[in-house]
Image (cartoon, grey):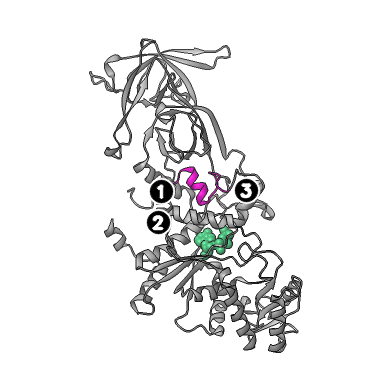
């Protein structure tokens, strides 16, 4: 659909990039995705990945993957690996442009020395609490550090000794010397370096001092010749500091510039590596890739496709105004894509025995079933039929309301791809619960159509009991009921809001035999029940399925984004 994407109007970030390229400000756009490796990537990061890598793709530019590993606390090489895997899975490639901020430590140190020599930075001996106390407020200026006018030589010497590991963490810091009266709080002599005794996952114990985000980020962008440094709105206040660092250090024009967009918020979802890590750490979910997690690895395991996540990110757009996107909209995109690509199969989640009385006990036959009505290339498969079947408990009602078109006493229903059957008897146990349905089939209706043209409205799915494969099926609900769990949580204790019923395990469910050896990762539709993925927990002959989404489009009810495609 080339035309569609050409016609699509550009979001404000893409417009800025297009204008800069048109003006010849840059030959090529260079963007970056700069995750801090302290957790797994989530759907919010996907939005940033799609934007940064998307700009590179659309404009013939490049996009760097840079690990912003300037805070060794909570960083882990395992996260570095998982992030790369997830970005590739989403469909993006950084080529040779894989970078680590930690590779720039030496250069960053030199730049810091430059600032000290110019009188733009000083070593401050106040504790972090004392610094915070003197920061002032939005209405009151801050109070200058007593070390603010320390001679450059002295600061330089102390900074070298900090690097040499002479001082304890917290003993002193390097601060920019900007303006304690600035209306922009991050400009009030911000901390640029601090002492930490945590070893780093790449530099080990080489560095006892670590640069702060604003200093490291702006300079990493400059070192890599980033043209457009795109981040979320919370960094807006720090843009003056970003510019100040680059200018004072003497980075020549054209310098990288920072642009902010509204981060993705998703209803009933927490998007923060730290809090998601808490769910994992406290055992509320099975791991970072639990199918209930909004992480890319969780969504992959659940059965979401990269195409649907990209379509979602594309559809929600890039703006400067915060708004919450309904989770249903993401599910809508997943459903749309799986409808095109997922093979169909039959399975029964809540089994009820149906005995076809007039079908001979020793007989069985194979009936052709369509693999994907959306995809003629997908062909057909053969599904075995026999006298005893499993049907869905919900598809039978002894005393049905008027519009119930499924099975009930005396009523005729179509068994998908098989025969028309009429319910003749209901078998109950001593407590009165229905345990079996008996029916007669019409041998003239093979394939599901009556030669006399009589109308049968209901069609239900089924599985031959003799051939059925037992499976564990995991059904999911969102982890939280609340639109905005963090806002609803008292004292930030969102753990209390976790739903008890976010995972329901159905065991055994019965599947048609073609699924007995379904490969891990396969995505399929169980007719009338939803889309599913084959979980890595599956063992030979015993699949474990995750329900990805149901077939019901609840997004349509909330707001139809565009006519369904
Ligand atoms: P988290 O709070 O989940 O840990 P972060 O912003 O601290 O996220 P980073 O690893 O620094 O995590 O994020 C890498 C990039 O992804 C940043 O440029 C950040 O702005 C962007 N990003 C993070 N969360 C979102 C979101 N919800 N929507 C859009 N972009 C996001
Ligand atoms: Mg964040």
Q: Residue at x 46, y 73 (%)?
A: 226
Measuring from the top left, give residue 216's x and y in whole percent.
Answer: 58, 73
Q: Which residues are magenta?
A: 288-308
Q: Which mark is residue 315?
A: 2
The label nearer to you, 2 versus 3, is 3
Query: 285 or 169: nearer the eye?
Result: 169
Secondary element at image label 3? helix
Marks 2 and 3 sit apart, C-alpha to C-alpha, by 30 Å
SS assignment at label 2 = helix
Q: Image quadrant of residue 447?
A: top left
Q: Judge whether 255 appears above or below 433 on screen.
A: below
Q: Which residue is mark 3?
A: 280
The N terminus, quarter of image: bottom left
Residue at numbered disc 1? 333
Is residue 52 left or right of 298 when viewed as pictured? left
> Earlier along the polypeptide chain: callout 2 or callout 3?
3
293 in magenta: yes
Residues under numbered marks 1 and 2 in contact, where contact means CB atoms less than 8 Å apart: yes
Residue beneath the point at 51% across and 39% down: 536
Residue for point 51% across, 49% down: 297
Q: Position of residue 432 (x, y in %)?
A: 55, 14
Among numbered discs 1 and 2, the one appearing first in the sequence: 2
* Location of residue 179 in the rendering, given as x and y in whole percent from the top left corner: 64, 84
Q: CA distance from mark 1 to mark 3?
A: 27 Å
């Amino acid at each position: 659909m080339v035309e569609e994407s050409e016609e699509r109007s550009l979001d404000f970030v893409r417009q800025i990039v297009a204008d800069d390229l048109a003006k010849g400000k840059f030959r090529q756009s260079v963007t970056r995705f700069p995750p801090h490796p302290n957790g797994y990537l989530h759907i919010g990061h996907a939005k940033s990945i799609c934007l940064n890598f998307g700009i590179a793709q659309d404009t013939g530019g490049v996009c760097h993957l840079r690990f912003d590993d300037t805070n060794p606390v909570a960083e882990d090489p395992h996260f570095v690996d998982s992030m790369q895997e997830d970005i590739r899975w989403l469909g993006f490639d950084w080529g040779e442009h894989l970078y680590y901020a930690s590779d720039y430590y030496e250069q960053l140190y030199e730049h810091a020395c430059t600032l000290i020599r110019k009188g733009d930075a000083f070593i401050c001996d106040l504790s972090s609490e004392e610094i915070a106390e003197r920061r002032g407020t939005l209405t009151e200026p801050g109070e200058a550090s007593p070390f603010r006018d320390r001679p450059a030589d002295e600061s330089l010497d102390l900074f070298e000794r900090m690097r040499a590991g002479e001082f304890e963490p917290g003993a002193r810091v390097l601060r920019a010397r900007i303006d304690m009266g600035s209306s922009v709080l991050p400009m009030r002599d911000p901390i640029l370096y601090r002492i930490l005794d945590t070893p780093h996952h790449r530099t080990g114990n080489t560095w006892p001092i670590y640069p702060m985000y604003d200093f490291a980020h702006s300079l990493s962008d400059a070192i890599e010749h980033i043209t457009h440094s795109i981040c979320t709105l919370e960094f807006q206040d720090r843009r003056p500091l970003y510019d100040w660092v680059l200018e004072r250090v003497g980075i020549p024009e054209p310098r990288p510039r920072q642009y902010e967009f509204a981060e993705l918020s998703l209803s009933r979802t927490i998007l923060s590596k730290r809090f998601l890590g808490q769910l994992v750490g406290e055992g509320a979910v099975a791991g970072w890739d639990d199918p209930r997690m909004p992480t890319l690895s969780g969504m992959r395991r659940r059965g979401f496709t990269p195409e649907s996540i990209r379509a979602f990110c594309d559809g929600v757009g890039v703006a400067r105004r915060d708004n919450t996107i309904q989770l249903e909209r993401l599910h809508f995109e997943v459903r749309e894509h799986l409808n095109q690509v997922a093979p169909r199969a039959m399975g029964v989640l809540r089994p009820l025995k149906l005995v076809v009385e007039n079908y001979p006990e020793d007989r069985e036959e194979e009936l052709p079933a369509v693999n994907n009505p959306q995809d003629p290339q997908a062909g057909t498969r053969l599904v075995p039929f026999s006298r005893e079947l499993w049907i869905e408990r919900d598809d039978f009602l002894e005393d049905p309301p008027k519009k119930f078109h499924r099975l009930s006493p005396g009523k005729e229903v179509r068994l998908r791809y098989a025969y028309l059957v009429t319910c003749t008897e209901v078998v109950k146990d001593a407590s009165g619960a229905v345990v079996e349905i008996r029916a007669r089939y019409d041998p003239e209706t093979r394939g599901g159509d009556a030669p006399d043209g009589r109308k049968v409205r209901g069609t239900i799915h089924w599985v031959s009991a003799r051939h059925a494969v037992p499976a564990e099926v995991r059904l999911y609900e969102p982890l939280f009921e609340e639109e905005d769990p963090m806002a609803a949580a008292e004292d930030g204790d969102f753990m209390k809001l976790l739903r008890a019923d976010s995972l329901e395990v159905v065991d055994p469910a019965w599947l048609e035999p073609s699924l007995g050896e379904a490969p891990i990762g396969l995505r399929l539709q169980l007719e009338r029940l939803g889309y599913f993925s084959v979980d890595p927990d599956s063992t030979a002959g015993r699949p474990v399925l995750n329900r990805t989404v149901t077939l019901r489009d609840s997004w349509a009810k909330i707001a139809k984004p565009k006519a369904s495609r």
